């Protein structure tokens, strides 16, 4: 048995308030409008080489005193890539550190006393009737929410802390639950013996839930067992597990078989029916716990052969090491977001949270990092990249060879990484004439929805095709395509380009945006 390292560990306040039962009121949020130039709390520095996925960033920052580890404030932000504030909301010291969009207007966030829906256009907040820890996850099919709740199992005088997965209606009726202790024995507890507040053995430490409504299955990440679990929502039974205590033959990015693929991971997320993106904290590494490299990893599974291959990794330098918290996201262009979000890192005392976008070559193409200010450091638990209207992918200069049929292919993506299909619509104008209009269902997980239009046979020359696309609340994006019919299209014609930025920003945001220009340190590297 390895030595316990709990005495040297500073826990985030994630579970401290778990067992409190009092209720609090959250004041209604306001989209502040000010004529003063203001900046994100924590004064981040942004670096970029310009080759990033240009949209908006959603996250909550916590400023924390590093003298007594108390929270100073927690603030929800939506910013552009330069850090200009679109939305700012103080969520209070009891706030959870995660927030996500459920549709184009509604944010889901929470605190230790409940979950909240906030409509950013009407500024109305609704408190839901349940509470949990780490995760609130919507089940759109049932109009319910999953969350996590702790419970204790006593065995021979020792208490073991486990998690229950609980599903609630919006008003707080429990409709389904599974106890993770039913299939995770005490022996799966991390050999570093993670403890929770009060010294109780923290066996599971579940920290994320992902629900796939087509398969009706739930994936739960458990930090302290170095394993994630696929659970049948119909029966509540365990279908398989993947990780240290899993059922899969696992390979690292080099194709080598590994007994353990990740250590104390966070924010497991589905990217397709057989792949996941995961934040591997690389904490309590059982082969080398002195050489930490937190990673963004993609795992692709084959449930027939029960193999799990690492199909992408971004392995960070040790000054990004994130012992707890963390998030990894897949963007439509294949880039990945990494939230190396702790208030400090190994061997690093001057920088707190580091939010990065990396490309397929594992190069950092954009980073927002928060230098410490005196004793105050900034932490970020998760982040999201979003657009404010649907995203179009097409080359705006579209070449067709003379004499060939002008078939224009394009792809649509929902505003953000939707976990269930979202409805929208589009219109196509050719030479200013409406030629096609239709509803569409955006594919989930930010996978492309492929569309094409047949313009027939055209004479050589220049033509204008306009795509107007709308989400379920009529937020629209417009793209003008120059269709070139030519004898000699260039060799590299029709390269896909992304157009994620909303051309028509909702009015309420526009007023906030125009008033909020912050000083910006933008370094090209
Ligand atoms: Ca969630
Ligand atoms: Ca994620
Ligand atoms: Ca995320």
Image: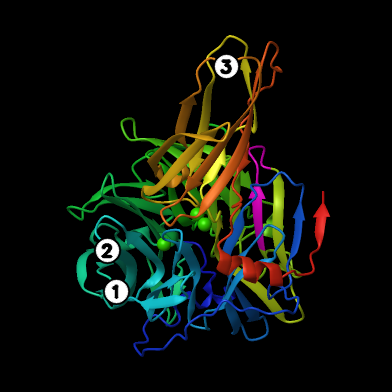
Q: In which quarter of the image is residue 143?
A: bottom left
| Tag 2 secondary structure | helix
Q: Which residue is drawn at 62% across and 65% down?
A: 510
Q: Is residue 161 magenta?
A: no
* Residue at which label 2 appears: 181
442, above or below 233, in the image: above
Whether label 2 lies within 8 Å of ligand 1 gets the answer: no
Colouring method of the image? rainbow
For residue 151, which numbered disc appears in the image? Answer: 1
Region of the chain picked out in magenta, as a range = 354-362
* Residue at which label 3 appears: 458
Q: Quadrant of residue 42?
A: bottom right
Category of crowding for the residue at label 3, using alpha-carbon neighbours closer than 10 angstroms: few (below 14), some (14–19), many (at least 20): some
Give the mark nearest the N terminus, 2 or 3: 2
Give the mark nearest the N terminus, 2 or 1: 1
Observer-nearest of 142 and 278: 142
Report x, y in % for residue 420. 36, 50
Is there CB contact under 8 Å for labels 2 and 1? yes
Whole-angstrom CA distance, mark 3 to mark 1, is 69 Å
Category of crowding for the residue at label 2, using alpha-carbon neighbours closer than 10 angstroms: few (below 14), some (14–19), many (at least 20): some
Q: Which residue is drawn at 57% across and 78% down?
A: 74
Report x, y in % for residue 228. 38, 52
Q: Is residue 358 magenta?
A: yes
């Amino acid at each position: 048995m390895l030595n316990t390292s709990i005495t040297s560990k500073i826990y985030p306040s994630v579970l401290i308030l778990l067992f409190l039962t009092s209720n609090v009121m959250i004041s209604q949020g306001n989209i502040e409008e000010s004529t003063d130039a203001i900046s994100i709390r924590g004064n981040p520095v942004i670096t970029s080489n310009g080759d990033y996925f240009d949209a908006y960033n959603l996250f909550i920052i916590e400023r924390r005193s590093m003298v007594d580890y108390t929270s100073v404030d927690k603030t929800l932000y939506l910013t552009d890539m330069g850090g200009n504030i679109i939305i700012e909301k103080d969520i209070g010291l009891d706030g959870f550190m995660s927030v996500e969009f459920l549709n184009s207007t509604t944010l889901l966030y929470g605190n230790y006393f409940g979950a909240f829906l906030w409509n950013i256009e009407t500024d109305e907040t609704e408190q839901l009737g349940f509470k949990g820890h780490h995760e609130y996850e919507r089940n759109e099919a049932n109009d319910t929410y999953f969350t996590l709740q702790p419970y204790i199992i006593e065995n021979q005088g020792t208490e073991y802390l486990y998690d229950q997965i609980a599903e609630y209606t919006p008003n707080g009726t429990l409709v389904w639950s599974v106890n993770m202790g039913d299939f995770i024995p005490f022996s799966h507890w991390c050999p570093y013996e993670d403890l929770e507040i009060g010294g109780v053995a923290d066996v599971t430490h579940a920290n994320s839930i992902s629900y796939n409504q087509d398969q009706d299955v739930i994936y739960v990440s458990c930090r302290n067992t170095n394993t994630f679990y696929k659970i049948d929502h119909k029966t509540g039974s365990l279908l398989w597990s993947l990780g240290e205590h899993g059922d899969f033959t696992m390979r690292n990015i080099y194709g080598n078989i590994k007994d353990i693929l990740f250590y104390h991971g966070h924010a497991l997320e589905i990217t397709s029916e057989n792949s996941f993106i995961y934040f591997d904290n690389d904490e309590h590494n059982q082969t080398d716990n002195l050489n930490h490299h937190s990673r963004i990893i993609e795992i692709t599974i084959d449930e027939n052969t029960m193999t799990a291959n690492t199909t992408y990794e971004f392995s960070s330098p040790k000054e990004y090491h994130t012992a707890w918290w963390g998030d990894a996201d897949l963007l439509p262009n294949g880039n990945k977001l990494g939230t190396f979000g702790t208030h400090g890192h190994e061997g690093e005392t001057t920088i707190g949270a580091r939010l990065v976008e990396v490309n397929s070559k594992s190069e950092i193409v954009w980073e927002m990092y928060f230098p410490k200010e005196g004793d105050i450091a900034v932490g970020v638990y998760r982040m999201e990249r979003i657009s404010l209207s649907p995203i179009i992918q097409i080359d705006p200069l579209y070449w067709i060879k003379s004499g060939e049929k002008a078939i224009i292919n394009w792809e649509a993506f929902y505003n953000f990484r939707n976990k269930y299909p979202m409805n929208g619509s589009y219109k196509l104008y050719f030479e200013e004439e409406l030629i096609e209009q239709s509803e569409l269902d955006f594919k989930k997980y930010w996978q492309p929805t492929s569309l094409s239009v047949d313009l027939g046979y055209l004479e050589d020359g220049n033509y204008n095709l306009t795509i107007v696309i709308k989400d379920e609340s009529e937020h629209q994006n417009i793209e003008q395509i120059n269709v070139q019919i030519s004898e000699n299209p260039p060799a590299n014609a029709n390269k896909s380009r992304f157009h994620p930025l909303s051309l028509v920003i909702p009015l309420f945001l526009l007023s906030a945006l125009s008033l909020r220009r912050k000083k910006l340190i933008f370094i090209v590297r």
